[in-house]
């Protein structure tokens, strides 16, 4: 999962996923990292233009609301129930997602550097994104 490492909402979402992903399926990388730039470019995605989380699931790439719903689907109960929203037309789901994404810094704040995971979680981060 690629996320905005400077966004407080995104960082809280990562921490939420870590807490509810008991199997440790998810790995994380900030969109600001060289790792994200290289990996996403191979899928034709410009990490610098992203206002979204990006989920890379095998060879499939999900963005915006689809990424959030596919993530929820893989967490422990009751969160997979949110996947039912996949039946709402994408233009509506993504419209709501983009509205939140446009306002995320104003509503939730912004960090000046990426969140630093504790040593026990560091292995779940693929990009060495932790910077002080």
Image (tube, rainbow, N blue to C red):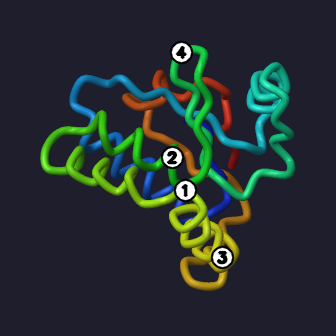
Label 2 secondary element: helix
Disc 1, disc 2: CB below 8 Å?
A: yes
Callouts 4 and 2 close, C-beta under 8 Å: no
| 51 relative position to 54: left or right | right
Looking at the rendered structure, the number of numbered marks drawn on it comes to 4
Residue drawn 66% across the image and 76% down it: 105
Q: Nearer the viewer, mark 3 or mark 1?
A: 1
Decide which of 73, 75 is in the foreground and name it: 73
Label 3 – label 1 distance at C-alpha: 24 Å
Please say if 84 is above or below 55: below
Q: Which residue is mark 4?
A: 58
- Callout 2: 10 Å neighbours few (<14), some, many (20+)? many
| Residue for badge 3 | 105
**Residue at the location (85% across, 52% down)?**
49
Q: What residue is rendered at 44% in x and 59% in y? A: 12
Q: Mark 1, mark 2: which one is toward the viewer? A: 1
Real-space CA distance between mark 1 and mark 4, rounded to the nearest whole angstrom: 22 Å
Give the residue pinned by disc 2: 66
| Helix, strand or loop status at disc 3 | helix
């Amino acid at each position: 999962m690629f996320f905005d490492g400077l966004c407080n909402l995104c960082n809280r979402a990562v921490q939420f996923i870590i807490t509810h992903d008991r199997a440790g399926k998810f790995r994380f990388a900030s969109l600001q990292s060289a790792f994200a730039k290289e990996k996403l470019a191979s899928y034709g995605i410009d990490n610098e233009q992203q206002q979204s989380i990006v989920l890379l699931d095998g060879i499939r790439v999900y963005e915006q609301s689809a990424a959030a719903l596919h993530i929820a689907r893989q967490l422990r109960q009751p969160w997979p129930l949110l996947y039912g929203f996949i039946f709402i037309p994408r233009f509506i789901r993504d419209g709501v997602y983009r509205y939140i994404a446009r306002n995320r810094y104003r509503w939730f704040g912004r960090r000046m550097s990426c969140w630093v995971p504790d040593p026990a979680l560091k292995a779940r981060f693929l990009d060495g994104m932790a910077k002080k």
